[in-house]
Each structure stands twice: as C-alpha cells, then as structure tokens.
Amino acid sequence: MSKQDTRIPDSQVNKALEDSIVALDKSRAQGFAELTALESAKYTVMQRDRARLAAKFGEDDPRVAALDEGVALHRERVTVYQAEMLGATATIPKVDDHSWAIHGHVLDAKLQPVEGITVSLFSGETWERTFSSSCTDKQGHFQLGPKAIKEESRSLTLKASQKEKVIYTDPVPVAIAAGRLEYRRVVLNEKNQTSCESPPESKPRRSK
C-alpha cells in the first residue's frame, strides 16, 4: 500500500499567505485610523487652547510658543499616520510563481498623495517599454504589472516623471524576478501638479 501524499499544494500555500497579508494590512489600517483620530483630537484641543492663550496673553507669550511646538508635533504625527494608512489600504497585485509586479505611492514633501505622476522603469537612460508605465491616481498609487517573467532576474531603476522630465530617481534598484512583489514609497522634494504623460524618450545613442 502506497503512503498517502500529505504535501500541501503550492496554490493552497500561496492562497493562505495572501489571505494572511490582507488580514494584517486591514489590522494595520485600522490601527493607523485609530491613531489618526486620537492625534487629530489632540491637535484640535491644542489649537483651541493656543487661540485662547494668544488672545489673553499675546502671541509672544512663552506658553503660546510651547503650545505651537505641541501643535506642530501632533500635526506631523497625523500626516505620518495618514501616509502609513495609504500603504495598508492599497490593493495588493496578485503575483504567482511566474509573474512579477511593483506598486506603491507617490507623495509630496508633506506626505500628501500626488496625482498624475508617471512612474516607469529604466535600464540606465532607456525606458523599458515592455513594463509600460503607470499614472498615479488620487491616492498617489501606482502599479506596474503583474507581468509574466520568463527571463533571468535583473535589476532596473524606478523613475517618476512629469511633463516628460524625470523628477525622482529611486536609489534602490528594482529586482525583476518571477514570483516577486514589491512596494515602494516615492517622496518628492516638492509638490507637483497633475500631468500624466509618457516617460521621457531615451536619448539617441551616438554612432561610433
């Protein structure tokens, strides 16, 4: 009598892992939502106290200056928590053993989503058209793939562009390999207006 095969199919394992990640992201999103609500409430109370003290003692009073620092701190925390919520609530691309994908968010210097930024992959100065490009939505989200990968793994560079001009180059290479899924957060130096277009054309190579 042959022994019964007790191995769990890869598809079942992948499904269980995918469900676990989704559940964890939902839990993270809920946690950040609660933290955001708490910090927002503190921010509102401190703003009210600051206005009351400023009206009574003047803008130059040390107690007003101290509250200004607290207000700025809580405002910064709310911004950070909201940015984290974006990542936790984003739809995760489905990748199998033969495909690859990358997704993420483009934010401005104040960690606010930027819509209409073109995100694409480059090999040196050459746009890898086979991976197309992605235009960020209102949440600043972008996604390249899922795409079937048949060749050996390699590394490319993620760039963000606007009006055919590169405005950000990710210093961390993007690994292209079957079964790989990545998340990236792109933070720009300054806020950009919406203008989703094709990536900049590669410069023609000079013939020797």
Image (tube, grey):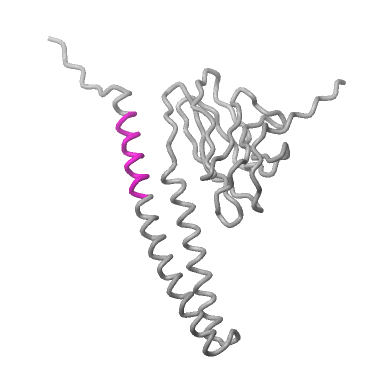
View extreme (right): residue: 208
Please provide percent x and percent y for residue 109: 61, 55
View extreme (left): residue: 1
Q: Is residue 58 above or below residue 83?
A: below
Please provide percent x and percent y for residue 81: 45, 57
View extreme (bottom): residue: 57
Q: Is residue 86 left or right of residue 127?
A: left
Which residue: 71% across, 39% down?
Answer: 163
Which residue: 80% across, 25% down?
Answer: 204
Q: Is residue 98 left or right of residue 109?
A: left
Residue 17: within the magenta? Answer: yes
Which residue: 39% across, 62% down?
Answer: 37
- In which quadrant of the rendered view does residue 54 lie? bottom right
Please provide percent x and percent y for residue 201: 74, 29
- In which quadrant of the rendered view does residue 93 lie? top left
Quadrant containing the N terminus in the rendered view:
top left
Which residue: 25% across, 22% down?
Answer: 7
Q: Is residue 176 above or below residue 79?
A: above
Main secondary structure along the magenta-highlighted residues: helix
- Point out the stretch of residues depicted in magenta: 14-28
Please provide percent x and percent y for residue 146: 49, 27
Residue 52: within the magenta? Answer: no
Q: Is residue 67 above or below residue 85?
A: below
Q: Is residue 196 left or right of residue 152?
A: right
Q: How many marks?
A: 0
Quadrant containing the C terminus in the rendered view:
top right
